[in-house]
Image: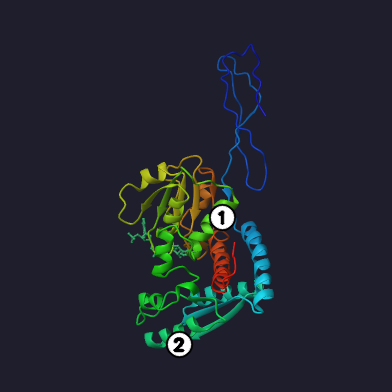
Amino acid sequence: MGARFPPKHKFFKPQKIIVVSQGDFWSLYLSKFCRCAPCSAKSLTLLVLVMPAILLKAKPVTDALDSSLVEKIKQFQKKKKRVPTLATVLVGEDPASQIYVGSKGKKCLELGLGHQDYKLSAKTSEKELLSLLKKLNGDKKIDGILVQKPLPKNISEWAVLDNLSFSKDVDGFTSTNFGLLAQNRDCLVPCTPAGIMALLKFYKIDVAGKKALVIGRSDIVGKPIGLLLLHANATVTYAHSRTTSMSDEVANADIIVSAIGKSAFLNSKFSFKKNAVIIDVGINRDSAGKVCGDADTESLISKVAAITPVPGGIGPMTIAMLMQNTVKAAYLREEMDYE
Ligand code: NAP
């Protein structure tokens, strides 16, 4: 695509023409006339094509991961005469937690994994929960244990983690798995950060040598994704609620992982590198009650190179990695080669 300027109208200024292909992710717009200043003759219409960000959807990634996992489950079943099994433990009746646990159970069924569902009353004591964990730790047919958070205030999350067998810690939250991760050794990696790395790999986004900004420093997302990016040779910066240079950090980053839980936090008021990739981990509700992430995707779509949608991005990746961790835990416990 291009524009021709009749030689006699020498005042036409060449315009920058950007040519793009059309596809799922592309849309283009803005056509305008160019005029010769002295005689007002029109040149050919110039098309300025805007190239919006690629939407890094989870679906093709989880489809690929799930189909190879199903093979691994079949191999395990053939050899061990049982299926890898996940136990989920829910204390209380938090509606969001009920939905999360329900979708994890559904995914187990879909892939052919075993699922044991423990629903305890909100009045459960810490001692009762720890005694259930002791039983599940010792149960040879359980490969993974997930205790859904948040827990009632009378139960210490540290006590739960310290009493969970690290070989069944499919969330990757115990201090043993966290320490192994920090040392870049094989372990059960927390599901959301593992899902982010799998998504980047699928879409061939190389992080080596890139500047990665991680916004949020929780133990379950921020800290571990920073470590994984560091191990993949990115130059990592952490930002959090006390960061005073957020605009500069965002403007300098090639990859931005936002995990803070604030809708539209990343918006067009920030400057971004043209090639920036945004990984939106946040799960929030907007003013209309619709699920959304930390990024105002609509206003950023023409400002960055790629962005994960919410919903349909890191959420499904997290569940997919939980399934992977359950099968990996089963293989490791049975001393089978996982890779
Ligand atoms: P969290 O424990 O809720 O902590 C939030 C983090 O964000 C903290 O480090 C906090 O900084 C930082 N923060 C808060 N407001 C900020 C601001 N205005 N500017 C900069 N930093 C700010 O974190 P989380 O558990 O990782 O959850 C974060 C979000 O991810 C939530 O929306 C959660 O629902 C979502 N999430 C999604 C998935 C998924 O599967 N997609 C999984 C897990 C979590 P300080 O440390 O200074 O307080």
Res. 315 in view: yes
Q: Residue 306: x percent and y percent?
A: 54, 47
Q: Residue at x 46, y 55 (%)?
A: 228
Crowd band around label 2 with a 10 angstrom C-alpha radius: few (<14), some (14–19), many (20+)? few
In terms of sequence position, does the residue under pointer 2 or pointer 1 come before the other? 2
Which quarter shows the C terminus?
A: bottom right
Q: Quadrant of residue 328?
A: bottom right
Front one among 323 and 334 = 334
Specify the amino acid type for callout 2. Answer: Ser
Q: Quadrant of residue 264?
A: bottom left
Side of 232 where 330 appears, left or right:
right
- What label sits on residue 62 in the rendered view? none
Ligand 1's image quarter is bottom left
93 w.r.t. 63: above or below: below
Circle 2 is placed at which residue position?
121
Side of 243 where 165 appears, left or right:
right
- What label sits on residue 199 in the rendered view? 1
Q: Residue at x 45, y 52 (%)?
A: 231
Distance in Å between CA atoms under marks 2 and 1: 37 Å
Specify the amino acid type for callout 1. Answer: Leu
Q: Residue 287: x percent and y percent?
A: 47, 62
Side of 18 where 251 appears, left or right:
left
Residue farthest front in this picture: 335
Res. 260 in view: no
Front one among 27 and 42 = 27
| Mark 2: secondary structure | loop
Q: Residue 64: x percent and y percent?
A: 65, 59
Front one among 29 and 325 = 325
| Mark 1: secondary structure | helix
Q: Residue 99: x percent and y percent?
A: 54, 75
